[in-house]
Amino acid sequence: MQISKIKRMIPERLYDELSKVISKLRPCQEKAIKAGMLSGRNLLVCTPTASGKTLIAELVMLKSILEHKGKAIYIVPLKALANEKYKDFTAHYGHLCKIAIAIGDFDSQDAYLRNFDMIICTSEKLDSLIRHNTPWLRDVAVVIVDEIHLLNDPGRGPTLEVLITLLRKLLEDVQVIGLSATIGNPDELAEWLGAELVEDNWRPVKLKQGVYFMGEIEFKK
């Protein structure tokens, strides 16, 4: 799908920015659009690493922000990943919206975040914000859950599950987008999220499986 096909579906400022660097959408991005990504549908996107999942999140977040529908929260499992996403999003979209990162250990409402449009945070930080009844959370319209397969993690899973449940209860019209490269039960998870399942096997670099022995690799045919 050519990016020109979605010109009327996203804000002009966002299209102008993306069209400078993208001419054609990747398979998972096209499937996500057809599944209702730009019309507020919840999605569970399960595709390989580097297949284009992040752009799906960016499109949904920036559309909501630039159309003044509400803030966007991008949840990540690790502080290092939060810092990486903050740098990337700020470099690409810092001139279009106000972006903040919230990963501090200090337990508070972090009222200053009400002045930002896109907030990148860890699940533990968002848990703290919810428990403090942070007022600006009512302004959130989009929630992106990166590495959503960690729901199955004995350490982080319970917190993430409670977070998603609470957010969907607190924000009746919130759009939830789950992203993962590996999910063992995608159909069940999509049903729990009330989401459309987007699956695709395309990857930018072909993955080969082989066995290394005595200095040589024998690839599986």
Image (cartoon, rainbow, N blue to C red):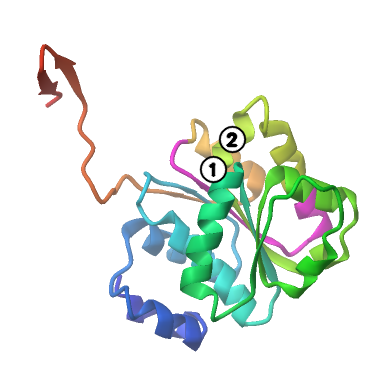
Mark 2 and mark 1: Cα distance apart in space: 6 Å
Query: Mark 2 highlights which residue?
Result: 150
Quarter placement of the C terminus: top left
Camera-nearest residue between 62 and 183: 62
Q: Amino acid at mark 2?
A: Leu
Magenta segment includes 178: yes
The N terminus sits in image quarter: bottom left
Farthest residue to the bottom: give it.
12
Estimate the x, y position of residue 112 in percent, counting from the top left. 80, 68
For the residues labelled 2 and 1, say whether their Cβ atoms are less than 8 Å apart: yes
Instruction: Kindly identify which numbered label has been placed on residue 52.
Output: none
- Quadrant of res 73: bottom right
Total marks in image: 2
How many C-alpha atoms fall within 10 Å of the one at disc 2: few (<14), some, or many (≥20)?
some
Quarter-wise, where is residue 22 in the image?
bottom left
Residue 69 colored in magenta in the image: no
212 and 80: which is toward the camera:
80
Residue at horizontal 60 percent and vertical 57 percent from the top: 42
The type of residue carrying mark 1 is: Glu
Q: Which residues are magenta?
A: 166-182
Residue 73 visible (yes or no): yes
Please tell me whether mark 1 sits on a helix, a strand or a loop.
loop
Q: Is residue 145 left or right of residue 128?
A: left
Q: Is residue 132 above or below residue 140?
A: above
Furthest toward the top, the residue is 214
Q: Secondary structure at mark 2?
A: helix
Q: Which residue is mark 1?
A: 147
In the rendered structure, the answer to whether residue 138 lies left or right of residue 29 reads right
Q: Position of residue 142 (x, y in %)?
A: 66, 64
- At 76% from the left and 74% from the top, the residue drawn is 115
95 displayed left or right of 17: right
